[in-house]
Image: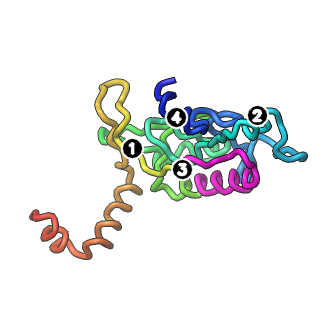
Amino acid sequence: HVGDDRILPLQFDFGSGVYSFFVPMASPDKLEITKPAEGWTDPPRKWMREHNVGHHYWAGVFNNNNTYVADWFVKEFGKDDDVWIKLIDGNVTRAAAGGFGQPNIWNPNVRSYMQNYCETQARYFHDDPTLVCYDYMGEPHPYASDPKTGMPQYGGFNDSALAAFREYLAHKFRTIEELNRRWKSS
């Protein structure tokens, strides 16, 4: 794999985890896998302990439609355009059930879902000795390109995202005059 020469010496699985690179959710507060009653003694973890190797999981919001979105969440909230990132051109990056999407982190239902997903994983895996970390991200960014145009995906144009940005500016600068003074603008 690309970059293996740099990551293999770290003895850390950046690519897949024990089950996959993410852990599916059956419902709020419930993963689709069961915690082993006998503890973390399965063959993959035994091998990792013997070789001093760890693994990780994704547990956050990522860019470019690669955030795990549980089926139950899509069924309950997926029709709401504000749940999905709105791009600069006005297109909404809606996802289908059973896969990946680009949820809008400024939407309260998405925030609640991500918090529940992370807390559920933490309760499940807190004593797994081979789990090194969760890969938490919460910031859509334009690093991935639009497959149609090859141009960066500038997201965050939902009403909730714009309101959050305005609230941030108001908190930071207090007045339009102060914003203009600091930005040397009018």
Q: Which of marks 3 and 2 is nearer the N terminus?
A: 2
Q: Earlier in the sequence, mark 4 or mark 2?
A: 4
Please state if 127 lies on the left or on the right of 86 as rendered. Answer: right
Q: Left or right: where does residue 55 sit relative to residue 14? A: right
Residue at the disc numbered 3 = 136
SS at mark 2?
helix
Residue type at mark 1 is Lys
Closer to the eye: label 3 or 4: 4
User: Viewer-nearest of labels 3 and 2?
Assistant: 2
Furthest-bottom residue in this view = 174
- Sequence-wise first label, 3 or 1: 1
**What residue is disc 2 on?**
47
Secondary structure type for disc 3: loop
Would you place residue 178 above or below residue 121 in this image? below
Cβ atoms at labels 3 and 2 below 8 Å apart: no
Answer with the quarter of the image where residue 14 lies. Answer: top right
Amino acid on which the number 2 mark rests in the picture: Trp
Residue depicted at 16% across the width and 68% down the height: 182
Identify the magenta region. 113-135
Circles 4 and 2 in contact, beta carbons < 8 Å: no
Please, what is the three-letter code of the amino acid marked with disc 3? Tyr
Q: Quadrant of residue 177?
A: bottom left
- Residue type highlighted by circle 4: Ile
State the image coordinates of residue 165 (x, y, percent, origin top left).
34, 60
Q: How crowded is the residue under tag 2: few (<14 C-alpha within 10 Å), some, or many (20+)? A: few
Label 3 and label 1: CA atoms lie apart by 22 Å
Q: Most extreme residue toward the right, as rendered?
A: 38
